[in-house]
C-alpha cells in the first residue's frame, strides 16, 4: 500500500461491513455439500451496506464463489455470533476487537500464519495470537484526537488578542484549556454556541469517553505492561480534561441550545453521537473528540475536507504528545468451517485487501486505512488521516501502528491456557515485550490504545456509568462526585482482574 491511514469514519466502520449480502443463488450449506466453496461473512458494522454489497456481488461474478453477508449491530454481535456458530451453516469469517475476543472465541479462531492475508500484512506484529498461532488480522488502522472546524478557529485567530495564532501552538493541556475557555467566552463573536459538542453519553456513544478518553489515564498506569491493579496516577489530569469538555460544551435543552438552562436539560444519556456530530458539522461548535473514522459521516453531513482538522488530545501527566493510534477491527477465520470454505474465505479477504477494485471502494470511497503492503490502494481523500500521516512522517498508518492491537506493548498472545468458561473474556496478566523500534518516527510521540488490555468489558462499562453520572450532575449544577469515577476506575479493573485469575 504505501499511504497512511486512508480512512475516515464510515470506513473502519465499514470494511467488515459487507452487509446483508447474499450473492448466492444456492444456500451455503448446499454448496458445501457439493464440495463447492461458500463464504459466510458475519459483520458487525452496518454503515457501508450499499457499497460493500456491490463489492461482494462483484467478487461472486468474478470467481463464481457465493458470498453471504450477515450484519449485526446494536451491541448484539457476540450474542448473535454464538447463535450463528450453532447453526448448520456457520460464519466462515467473523470479527474480534481485541485479545479478549480471541479468548472468547478460542475454539473458533483458525491459525493464519503462512496464509495470503497474513503475508499481505505490512506490520505483522500488529496481529493477535493464541498459543503461538496468529489468529486475528487487523484490517484497519485508526487515530483519534480533537477534531476541529478550521474556519471557526481561523476566525478565533483573527480576533483581537487571541491566546494563540495557530493550532500548532497548543502543545500542552494548560494551553488547550486556556484557548478553549477563551473560545467559549467569545463564542458570540465567533458565531457559535460552544467550544465543544454536547458530551454524548448514551450507551451507544459513551465509548468515546469510557474507552478513548480514559485511555489517556491508562498510559500512566500501564506504562510498563499489563497489571492487575491501577494506581490512578493520571486521574487528576483526566478529571481536568473531562471538566473542560463539559464546561465548554453545548448541552441540548428542550427549548433552546443554552448550556445554562439546567431545568430543561435533556439527560446526557439520551444524547447520541449523531446529535453531537450534527452540532459540529453544522458549525454550532468548534471541536469534538473524535477520530479518523468520523470523516465519512462529516462528509455526508456536508463538511468539506478543507474545513476539517485534528489535533492530539493534551492531558496533564501523559508524556506522549501525539495522536492515539491503534485498531479494534480484526478478521478471523472459523476453524470449524470446512477446509475448502476456510481457503475460499482467506482468498476473499486477500482480494479485499489487495485488489484495485476493492481498494477503490474501501479506501477511496469508505476512507479505510488498510495495513497491507501489496495492495493497489487508491489515494484517500480523508483529511484527518492525511493530517496524522504528515505528523508522523510516515507513508502509511500501519507502519505507525504499535504492535499488539495498537497497545504499544508488543504483539498480544492469548497463551495462558484455556478456562472452563467458554464465554469468558478474561485475559491473564503477564509481562509484555517492549514495542519494536522504528527509525521513521519517535516512539514516545504516539499514545497507545491501552483500553484493549482491560481484563474484560466490565471496566469500560463501569467507567461509562460513572462518567455519565458525573457529567449529568455537572451539567445540572449538582455536586458532581469525581471520587465515584476514581472508585470505578480502580475497583472495576481490580475486580475483573481477580475474577480472571480465579478462572485461570
Image: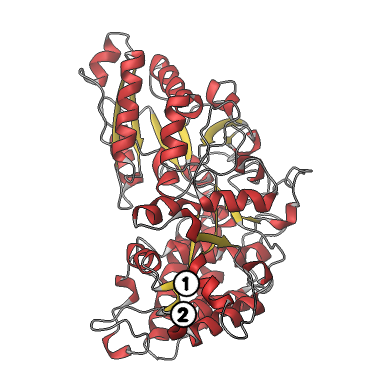
Badge 1 marks a residue whose secondary structure is strand
Badge 2 marks a residue whose secondary structure is helix
The span from disc 1 to disc 2 (Cα, nearest Å) is 10 Å
x and y percent of residue 317 in the render? 69, 72
Q: Is residue 349 left or right of residue 26?
A: right
Which of these two is toward me, 361 or 53? 361
Residue 219 visible (yes or no): yes
Which of these two is toward me, 140 or 3? 3
x and y percent of residue 40 in the render? 32, 27
Which of these two is toward me, 398 or 358? 358
Tell me where residue 86 sits by quadrant: top left
Q: Which residue is pictured at 43% across the width and 68% down the height?
A: 464
Residue tagged 2 = 190
Residue 459 visible (yes or no): no
Determine whether 475 is above or below 26 in the image.
Answer: below
CB under 8 Å between discs 1 and 2? yes
Q: Is residue 460 left or right of residue 432?
A: left
Q: Residue furthest right?
A: 439
Total numbered badges shown on the rendered structure: 2
| Mark 1 neighbour class, 10 Å CA radius: few under 14, some 14 to 19, many 20 or more | many
Colour treatment of the image? secondary structure
x and y percent of residue 288 in the render? 47, 67
Determine whether 243 is above or below 132 in the image.
Answer: below
Tell me where residue 226 sits by quadrant: bottom right
Residue tagged 1 = 286
Q: Residue furthest top?
A: 34
Which of these two is toward me, 320 or 384? 384
Q: Which residue is pictured at 49% across the width and 80% down the height?
A: 484
Q: Is residue 67 left or right of residue 387?
A: left
Disc sitting over residue 117 in the figure: none
Amino acid at each position: 500500500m504505501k499511504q497512511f491511514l486512508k480512512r475516515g469514519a464510515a470506513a473502519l466502520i465499514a470494511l467488515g461491513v459487507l452487509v446483508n449480502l447474499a450473492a448466492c443463488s444456492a444456500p451455503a450449506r448446499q454448496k458445501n455439500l457439493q464440495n463447492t466453496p461458500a463464504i459466510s461473512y458475519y459483520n458487525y458494522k452496518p454503515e457501508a451496506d450499499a457499497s460493500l454489497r456491490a463489492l461482494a456481488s462483484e467478487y461472486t461474478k468474478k470467481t463464481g464463489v457465493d458470498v453471504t453477508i450477515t450484519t449485526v449491530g446494536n451491541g448484539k454481535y457476540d450474542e448473535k455470533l454464538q447463535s450463528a456458530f450453532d447453526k448448520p451453516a456457520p460464519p466462515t469469517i467473523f470479527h474480534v476487537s481485541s485479545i479478549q475476543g480471541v479468548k472468547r472465541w478460542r475454539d473458533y479462531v483458525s491459525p493464519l500464519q503462512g496464509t495470503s492475508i497474513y503475508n499481505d500484512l505490512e506490520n505483522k506484529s500488529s496481529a493477535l495470537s493464541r498459543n503461538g498461532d496468529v489468529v486475528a488480522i487487523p484490517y484497519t488502522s485508526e487515530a483519534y484526537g480533537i477534531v476541529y472546524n478550521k474556519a471557526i478557529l481561523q476566525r478565533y485567530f483573527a480576533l483581537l488578542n487571541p491566546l494563540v495564532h495557530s493550532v500548532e501552538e497548543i502543545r500542552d493541556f494548560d494551553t488547550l484549556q486556556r484557548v478553549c475557555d477563551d473560545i467559549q467566552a467569545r463564542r458570540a463573536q465567533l458565531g457559535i454556541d460552544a467550544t465543544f459538542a454536547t458530551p454524548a453519553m448514551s450507551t451507544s456513544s459513551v465509548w468515546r469517553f469510557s474507552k478513548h478518553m480514559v485511555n489517556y489515564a491508562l498510559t500512566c498506569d500501564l506504562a510498563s505492561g499489563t497489571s492487575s491493579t491501577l494506581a490512578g496516577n493520571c486521574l487528576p489530569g483526566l478529571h481536568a480534561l473531562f471538566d473542560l469538555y463539559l464546561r465548554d460544551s453545548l448541552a441540548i435543552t428542550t427549548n433552546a441550545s443554552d448550556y445554562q438552562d439546567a431545568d430543561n436539560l435533556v439527560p446526557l444519556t439520551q444524547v447520541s453521537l449523531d446529535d453531537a456530530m450534527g452540532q459540529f458539522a453544522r458549525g454550532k461548535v468548534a471541536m469534538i473528540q473524535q477520530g479518523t473514522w468520523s470523516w465519512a459521516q462529516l462528509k455526508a453531513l456536508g463538511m468539506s475536507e478543507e474545513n476539517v482538522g485534528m489535533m492530539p488530545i493534551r492531558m496533564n501527566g501523559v508524556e506522549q504528545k501525539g495522536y492515539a493510534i491503534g485498531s479494534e477491527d480484526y478478521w478471523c477465520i472459523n476453524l470449524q468451517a470446512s477446509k475448502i470454505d476456510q481457503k475460499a474465505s482467506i482468498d476473499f479477504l486477500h482480494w479485499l485487501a489487495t485488489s484495485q477494485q476493492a481498494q477503490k471502494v474501501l479506501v477511496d470511497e469508505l476512507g479505510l486505512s488498510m495495513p497491507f503492503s501489496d495492495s493497489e490502494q487508491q489515494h484517500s481523500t480523508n483529511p484527518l488521516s492525511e493530517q496524522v500521516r504528515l505528523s508522523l512522517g510516515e507513508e502509511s498508518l500501519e507502519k505507525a501502528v504499535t504492535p499488539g492491537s495498537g497497545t504499544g506493548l508488543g504483539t498480544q498472545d492469548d497463551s495462558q491456557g484455556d478456562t472452563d468458561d467458554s464465554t469468558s473474556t478474561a485475559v491473564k496478566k503477564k509481562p509484555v515485550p517492549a514495542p519494536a523500534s522504528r527509525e521513521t518516527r519517535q516512539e514516545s510521540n504516539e499514545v497507545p490504545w491501552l483500553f484493549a488490555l482491560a481484563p474484560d468489558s466490565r471496566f469500560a462499562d463501569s467507567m461509562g456509568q460513572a462518567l455519565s453520572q458525573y457529567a449529568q450532575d455537572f451539567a445540572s449544577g449538582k455536586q458532581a462526585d469525581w471520587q465515584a469515577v476514581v472508585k470505578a476506575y480502580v475497583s472495576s479493573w481490580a475486580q475483573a482482574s481477580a475474577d480472571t485469575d480465579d478462572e485461570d
